[in-house]
Amino acid sequence: MTQKRALVVRGGWEGHEPVKATELFLPFLRDNGYAVRVEESTDVYADTAEMAATDLVVQCVTMSEITREQVTGLSEAVVAGTGFTGWHGGIADSFRASADYLHLVGGQFATHPGKEPCERRGGAEDNFLPHTINLTEAGRAHPVTAGIEDFKLDTEQYWVLHDDLIDVLATTTHPARPWQPWHRPVTSPAVWTRRWGAGRVLVTTPGHSLDVLEHPDVRTIIERGMLWATRTASAS
């Protein structure tokens, strides 16, 4: 059997610790038989031959920029069957100026609501709110999230703008608090899949910090997501 090839692409905003975050998952990939290549920039996306030989892309690049050639290379690889996955800002808040990238992923970070103004102290914790990740009916049956129950986190809660071509496995609801400008609760996708050509995309929005990535349910979803998104025999 041909060994699967995983490409880990990391960089962008250092606040999400892209090196330490991705290092958490390299042993899992290797233990599951992947040959792993790590790149510190998106230049590799423009390498047609490399992308065609890649079965899974794991991306952790928050914000940053991407060239037209790079996003075209990534998208064409996914259409041809390469899997694409990641977590938090590393996939859902990447390359804000690229409409083609947003079209590929199907959802984009808009904000993470903060605490009541009087409780803010100027640090990252100002945006940490207790919230629940709720499994959908589809999520309870999907191999990535089957067996996982609703779970609670105290971290950034992503508000996501999205289209209806995604299949939502889990959601999170932002309440309408008195100091916020919205007037009713808003539900955002927290975990979703997307079929794009012959490829599979899996996005997990929790993952702001290493402790969140090490949460048993979050880590399970990310790791199962890597296996699920990987190129299937029918896409080879």
Image (spheres, helix red, strand yellow):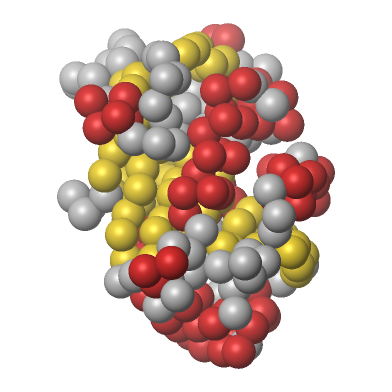
The correct choice, above or below, for 198 with respect to 16 in the image is below
The answer to which of 155 and 6 lies nearer the viewer is: 6
Give coordinates of residue 91: x percent, y percent. 52, 53
Give coordinates of residue 94: x percent, y percent. 53, 59
Q: Quadrant of residue 126?
A: top right
Give coordinates of residue 6: x percent, y percent. 65, 63
Q: Residue at x 26, y 44 (%)?
A: 167
The correct choice, above or below, for 137 with respect to 197 in the image is above
The answer to which of 23 and 124 lies nearer the viewer is: 23
Instruction: Give the tally of numbered discs.
Output: 0
Q: Residue at x 50, y 44 (%)?
A: 225
Q: Residue at x 56, y 15 (%)?
A: 154
Name the quadrant of the N terminus.
bottom right
Q: Residue at x 18, y 50 (%)?
A: 164
Name the quadrant of the C terminus.
bottom left
Give coordinates of residue 216: x percent, y percent. 62, 21
Q: Is residue 17 left or right of residue 50?
A: right
